[in-house]
Image (tube, grey):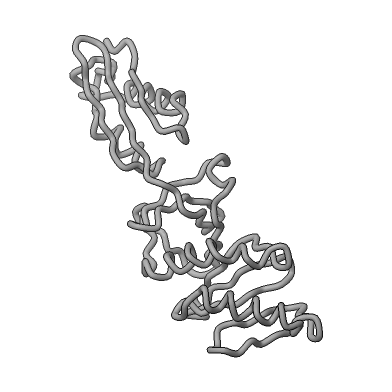
Amino acid sequence: MISGFTIEVPKTIAKADIERYAWQQADQMRYVFLTQHFLPLFNTKELSNKLNQQYLLGSVEILKKWPNKIDIKLTGKPYHLIWQEGGMDYVVNRYDLASAPANQSDASNLTVVENKGSNKITNNVITLPSDKINFICELSAIIKKLEPQYPIQKFEIDDQTLHTITAQSNALKLYFNDQLDPGLQIEKLLTAIKQGVLVNKKPSSYIDLRWGDKIYLQ
């Protein structure tokens, strides 16, 4: 009979949660009348699949140690943004677009992207061009130059505006073109701020930076 689990996890994952999943696996029946509390019957592949569905993991190692122990070692992937879709929040790795359900502790310092279009997550992967995600991450890193005038709460995408990334700043929307250099679009707005353009015509609805060297306000 399994007496316990030795668990090694990243700081972002609670050991108690992994132990709970492991015992739930052990409680499942196998071969009709037997539970997986017997070491040879414990299904490591099934537990590995469940953990990969719940967390953004780089690797999962589950080793049976005779006579009654199981070692579980998880390594995590870095989180780069929070993806909101279908009433759910997901953490996302920008390099392979892998995703997993987000915990409250995950969201503290991450860029938030709200998908207002059709669902983009399939089999824990975002089905969206990687260059769009990379644009958002790069834009998020440099858009802090606009603070405190325009603090950004989140970014938005939809299916209607193909190459538009919307940044939400309180009641104001900032429109960016993901086919153009994000840094140049930010610098264009900073120049307009320095020149007092936005003082003479203060926008209340949006600032559109998508069109070359022009800025459109409303």
Closest to the observer: 106 or 32?
106
Point out the image quarter for the N terminus.
Answer: top left
User: Which residue reaches farthest right?
Assistant: 200
Residue 216 place in picture, x, y as percent: 66, 87
Where is residue 129, by image quadrant?
A: bottom left
Residue found 46% across the figure and 80% down from its top: 180
Where is residue 70, by image quadrant?
A: top left
In the image, is residue 203 above or below residue 51?
below
- Is residue 152 visible in this depiction of the protein? yes
Residue 6 place in picture, x, y as percent: 33, 18
In the image, is residue 49 above or below residue 80?
above
Judge from the rendering whether residue 28 lies leftward or rightward of residue 45; answer left or right.
Answer: right
In the image, is residue 111 above or below residue 105?
below
Residue 138 place in picture, x, y as percent: 48, 65
Closest to the observer: 123 or 91?
91
Judge from the rendering whether residue 127 lies leftward or rightward of residue 60; answer left or right.
Answer: right
Closest to the observer: 172 or 114?
172
Residue found 37% across the figure and 45% down from its top: 77
Point out the image quarter for the C terminus.
Answer: bottom right
